[in-house]
Amino acid sequence: MTALITAAAFFALGCYAVASILVLIRLMRGPRAQDRVFALDLLYFHAMLVILVLDIHHKTDVYFDAALLIALFGFVSSSAMAKFILRGEVIE
């Protein structure tokens, strides 16, 4: 069972690496600001998933707190960027 989990973890990490590279291309070449905000949101999401896969692979709960913080900061920053794009200011 351990070999299967290890292989699945490495496969998932490889898939997230390819997806992150494609998202970085979208972040750099995005024609609109909305595309760039969405790409940055996906990068936060990929970072959280990579940390969770490492947590499963190492069989520990230490990484879960870091993934939770990344998810929280990703949501708050995406909301702030969306509000800035819509209104031109973050704080009213």
Image (spheres, rainbow, N blue to C red):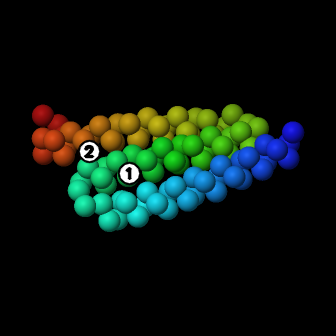
Foreground residue among 1 and 73: 1
Q: Is residue 91 in sight in this rendering?
A: yes
Q: State the count of labels.
A: 2
C-alpha gap between disc 1 and disc 2: 10 Å
The disc placed on residue 40 is 1
Which residue occupies 60% across, 47% down? 50
In this rendering, position of residue 5 left or right of residue 41? right
Q: Is residue 89 in sight in this rendering?
A: no
In this rendering, position of residue 63 left or right of residue 21? right
Residues tagged 1 and 2 counted as in contact (Cβ below 8 A)? yes
The disc placed on residue 1 is none
Which residue occupies 37% across, 60% down? 26
Residue at numbered disc 2 = 81
Q: Position of residue 36 (x, y in %)?
A: 31, 54
Which residue occupies 53% across, 48% down? 47
Q: Amino acid at mark 1?
A: Leu
Question: Neighbour class for label 2 at 10 Å: few (<14), some, many (≥20)?
Answer: many
Q: Amino acid at mark 2?
A: Met
Which residue occupies 57% across, 52% down? 16
Label 1 sits on a secondary structure element that is: helix
Label 2 sits on a secondary structure element that is: helix
Indicate whether 72 appears above or below 49. Answer: above
In this rendering, position of residue 1 left or right of residue 59? right
Q: Position of residue 8 (x, y in %)?
A: 74, 46
Indicate whether 54 appears above or below 36. Answer: above
